[in-house]
Image (cartoon, grey):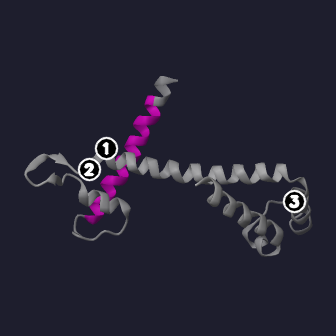
Amino acid sequence: MTRRMKKVSRDLDLVLENIIEEIEQISSGQQNRHSDFIHVLLSLMNQPMNPHDEHVYIINRTDIKAIIINMISGAYDTSSTAIELTFSELLRHPRVMKHVQEELEGVVGMKRMVEETDMKNLTYLDMVAKESLDYTLLHHY
């Protein structure tokens, strides 16, 4: 397991390094143009925190990669937590779950997956989703 984790870590580091290098190449001719978050971080890289002490930097490449990983994992965790809470609330309220199931069967049927175009006809599901997001935001974050 340790060997696999080290390989995943190396692979992830390589992917992040490629992203950073690509952004550096794109922005090398466009000084003082910050088009996204990584550009801003790169503009801070290797700038001294204190002009009198040039060995203490605001941020380095490793910090940038760690911030990117934290942002990705934070976004993933937030979404999965919201979905998990929604399902747990549906299990706690079988009447609501039954209504959602009936609406899905009536609008979409049992032969295919729900598509984005179906959403305009799934009003109850839309209300349940909005309610669960409101609940998640108010009670858990």
Position of residue 58 relative to residue 114, above or below, is above
Mark 2 lies on a secondary structure that is: loop
Residue 96 numbered mark, or none: 3
Question: Mark 3 belongs to which amino acid?
Answer: Val
Question: Mark 2 belongs to which amino acid?
Answer: Ile
Quote the CA–CA distance across marks 1 and 2.
8 Å
Residue 56 appears in which quarter of the rendering?
Answer: top left
Between 60 and 105, the one lying in front of the other is 60
Percent from the top left, x then y, of residue 69? 44, 47
* Mark closer to the observer (3, 1): 3
The residue segment tinted magenta is 6-27
How crowded is the residue under tag 3: few (<14 C-alpha within 10 Å), some, or many (20+)?
some
Q: Is residue 49 left or right of residue 26?
A: left
How crowded is the residue under tag 1: few (<14 C-alpha within 10 Å), some, or many (20+)?
few
Residue 59 numbered mark, or none: 2
Question: Mark 1 belongs to which amino acid?
Answer: Thr
Residue 136 appears in which quarter of the rendering?
Answer: bottom right
First in residue order: circle 2 vs circle 3? 2
Q: Based on the picture, tell me whether residue 43 belongs to the magenta stretch.
A: no
Percent from the top left, x then y, of residue 116? 72, 69
Quote the CA–CA distance across marks 3 and 1.
47 Å
Between 28 and 96, the one lying in front of the other is 96
